[in-house]
Structure formats: C-alpha cells, structure tokens
C-alpha cells in the first residue's frame, strides 16, 4: 500500500477544506489534467467527481475506495496484464462543471467515465458520454432513472442498488417488525429522495401497510420542519413509525427536530442517512433510528465479516482514517465489476465495453457476491442491504434485508417488476 492519505470527510464541517487535501490519487493514477497515454497497454478510467461542495461527502470516499481497488488490481497484474490508468477532475458539486469535465476527459482518450453519486449532478456528464458512445457509470447515484436506458441513454449505468430498492427494503423491514401505519416525511431537494419516498410508500402499501399521512420539506442545509411535526402530532391515527426520505445533513436535522418536537416513534430512512454525521447532528441520546445501508463497518458495531474488516483496514492504511459511511464500499465494488467486464470484453471500445457490462456476472465483494447490470437494468440487480440502527447514540448492525421485487409505480422503471 502507499503511504497514509488524509480523509477530509469525517464530518461535514471539513468539506470546504477538501480542495487542498485532494484524496483521489493512487498507484497508476493521474489526478492532473493530462490525458490518457492511449494504446492497448492500459485501460483508462476518467473520474469526474466532487472533491468540494455539498456532494463531496458522497463522492470522496467512494472515489478513494475506487482508487484503492484499482491499486490492488494493478498490483495483481491488472486486467489481463493491462494496467488501469486514472484521470481525475473535481467537478465541485456543479452540474455545469460535470459536463465540462466529462467533455475534457473523453477528449483525452478515456475508455470509461465515472460520474458523481447523484442523478441530478451526473446527468450532464452522462449525456456527454452517451453522445460519444463511452460507458458512464455513476459511482453511487440512487435514483432509478440513472439505470433506465431510455432516460439518459444506453451507455449510462449506476453502481448502486438504487433508491427504489432502498425505499422498498425499508418498507419490507418495517412490515417484518409488525408496524402497520407509516408516516412519510419527504425531502423534495433531489431526485434520489423523491424516488426513495415514492417506492417506500408503494412497497409498504403493497405489503399490507397504510400510509396514514405524508408531508414534504425542501431539504438542504437550513431545514425547519416545525410545521410538519405539528401536523404529524395532530393526526387522528398516529403512525407506528416515520419514514424520512432524505439525505444528510438535512435528513439528520429533520430527525433531530422530530425528537425535539416530542415525536418518539421509530424513524426509518434510506442509505443517505448513513454515517457518523447522523450522530453528530442528532446527538448522543438518539434512539429508534433505522436505515437501509450498504454495509456495517468502522463506526458501526456488530459488523459483517472478515472481508469487510480487511477492506476497512486497507482503506485506513491508504487514507489515514476509516471510511465515514458505507458509500465507500460502492466505489470499491464498482471497480471490481468494471474490471471483470473489461476483462471479458472483446475490446475496450465503447460498444464492446457496454455489451460486457450489460452481460455482467456476479462478482465477489467484501459483503459477498453482487450481481450488477443487465441489458434492461443498468444498476445493481441483486445485493442485500444492511439494516443499521441507532440506539442511545450508538450505530449498530441490525440485520440484512432482501426484497423479491421492486414495485411498479408507473414511472417506466425498467428494473421494476
């Protein structure tokens, strides 16, 4: 491994400093603006991720983990003897910058583009890649439109199970707890949270539950849900739990305000609530909070096995601290899937890589085998989600939950049943 590198995203308060401590570098990588060396001896991946701005906490650690996996693959001989080369650009959480960065990276001669952990932010870069017939994979965008070949194009993928799966999994787990009445508190700030809430409600009702009320809030950095909390408290039928379809730090702030308003029923939410920042915001007394994440490690007690512990150890050796959320694992696993597809592709041309990605087979990851893409569903097809709970200010592993299918909500989701 290379020498330790700082992880600037242990908490949200350090986001502004990331530009000066850029972590996206690894053996065989190039974080400058220089292009690919070209030729058949390397496989070049362009990373257009946010190393600054409000999306950086969702991009930096998955990007770091991707570089760690690339380093390991290169040390093990690469892809059929060909080394993986990387070129990285900071898109600064700006959709306009994503499109520009994608254009520059593709012009430099990359074979595959990696875009940010968000549909809204990835879309401009994915559109550029689609026009150039270069595969583009969001490192962890959750909105199912990222995986729909008819929305952004058939060269666009996401290395995530998706907010449709997260919402439906949360619903299935709640039903298993015997909870019959839910209240949906919907963050309207990004497509990820909108789809998480929509699929949660559909799955919960399909499974026999009742959504007794719902409300929305703008999300973002200045959340105030006092009026929503008052309406919830005045419902004729009180819920067994509240599903908070949001992302941090706004989601954590909304949960804290629910508790401050005296609403003590359990809270359930999607993976974007994961990480130390949740505890930093909700406080040491927080309890009865659950979310469907990708793994339980580091900050989370009762983890999921030796392979996951090794991933955390290797990550800490390279970056100087453990990952702050389970999103890091998605970047690591993504590279495994890319390398497997590239190794089976007839060539590194865009069309051949796309065909190999669509013909993905299960790959071994620190949480077990994960099945990636198909010709109709351009995201993770089969991966168990971890239910993670917060009790008295401690995060712990509750169990794994799988769903049999994604509900059809009439939005054209090609991954739904």
Image (cartoon, rainbow, N blue to C red):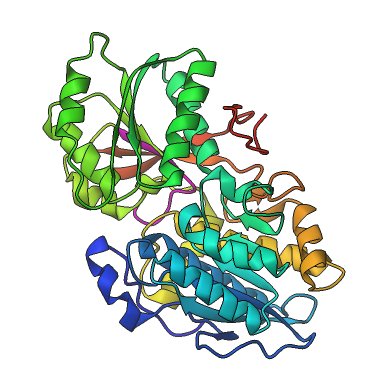
Estimate the x, y position of residue 414 in percent, counting from the top left: 68, 38
Q: Nearer the viewer, residue 322 or 106?
A: 106
Q: Quadrant of the C terminus?
A: top right
Q: Nearer the viewer, residue 271 or 34?
A: 34
Q: Residue furthest top?
A: 236
Q: Is residue 364 left or right of residue 118?
A: right
Query: Does any portion of residue 66 appear in the rendered image?
Result: yes
Q: Quadrant of residue 54?
A: bottom left
Q: Quadrant of residue 82?
A: bottom right
Q: Residue at x 76, y 69 (%)?
A: 350
Query: Does any portion of residue 286 appear in the rendered image?
Result: no
Span colored in magenta: 289-299
294 in the magenta segment: yes
Q: Residue at x 64, y 77 (%)?
A: 106
210 in the magenta segment: no
Q: Is residue 1 above or below residue 392?
A: below
Q: Residue at x 46, y 59 (%)?
A: 121
Estimate the x, y position of residue 137 in percent, counting from the top left: 61, 61
Q: Residue at x 26, y 14 (%)?
A: 238
Q: Quadrant of residue 228?
A: top left
Estimate the x, y position of residue 68 in percent, counting from the top left: 54, 73
Q: Is residue 390 above or below residue 62?
A: above
Q: How many marks?
A: 0
Q: Is residue 263 left or right of residue 399?
A: left
Estimate the x, y position of residue 5 in percent, counting from the top left: 39, 80
């Amino acid at each position: 491994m290379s020498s330790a590198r700082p992880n600037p995203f242990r908490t949200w308060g350090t986001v502004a400093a990331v530009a000066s401590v850029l972590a996206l570098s690894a053996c065989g990588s190039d974080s400058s603006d220089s292009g690919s060396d070209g030729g058949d001896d390397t496989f070049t991946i362009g990373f257009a991720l946010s190393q600054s701005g409000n999306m950086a906490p969702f991009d930096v650690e998955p990007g770091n983990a991707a570089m760690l996996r690339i380093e390991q693959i290169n040390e093990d001989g690469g892809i059929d003897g060909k080394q993986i080369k990387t070129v990285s650009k900071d898109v600064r959480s700006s959709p306009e910058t994503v499109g520009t960065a994608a254009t520059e990276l593709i012009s430099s001669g990359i074979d595959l583009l990696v875009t940010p952990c968000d549909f809204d932010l990835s879309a401009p870069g994915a559109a550029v890649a689609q026009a150039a017939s270069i595969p583009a994979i969001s490192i962890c965008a959750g909105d199912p439109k990222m995986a729909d070949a008819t929305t952004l194009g058939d060269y666009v993928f996401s290395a995530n199970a998706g907010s449709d799966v997260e919402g439906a999994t949360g619903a299935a787990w709640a039903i298993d707890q015997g909870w019959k009445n839910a209240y949906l508190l919907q963050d309207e700030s990004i497509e990820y949270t909108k789809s998480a809430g929509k699929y949660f409600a559909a799955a919960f009702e399909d499974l026999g539950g009742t959504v007794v009320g719902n409300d929305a809030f703008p999300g973002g950095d200045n959340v105030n849900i006092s009026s929503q909390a008052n309406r919830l408290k005045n419902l004729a039928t009180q819920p067994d739990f509240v599903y908070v379809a949001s992302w941090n730090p706004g989601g954590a702030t909304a949960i804290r305000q629910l508790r401050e308003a005296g609403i003590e029923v359990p809270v359930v939410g999607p993976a974007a609530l994961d990480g130390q920042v949740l505890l930093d915001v909700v406080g040491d007394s927080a309890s009865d909070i659950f979310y469907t994440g990708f793994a339980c490690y580091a900050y989370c007690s009762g983890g999921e096995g030796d392979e996951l512990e090794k991933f955390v150890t290797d990550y800490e050796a390279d970056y100087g601290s453990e990952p702050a959320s389970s999103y890091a694992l998605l970047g690591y696993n993504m590279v495994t899937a890319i390398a497997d597809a590239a190794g089976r592709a007839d060539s590194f041309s865009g069309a051949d890589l796309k065909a190999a990605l669509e013909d993905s087979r299960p790959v071994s990851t620190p949480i077990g085998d994960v099945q990636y893409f198909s010709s109709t569903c351009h995201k993770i097809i089969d991966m168990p989600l971890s239910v993670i709970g917060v009790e008295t200010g401690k995060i712990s592993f509750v169990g794994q939950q799988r769903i049999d299918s994604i509900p059809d909500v009439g939005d054209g989701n090609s991954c739904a049943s």
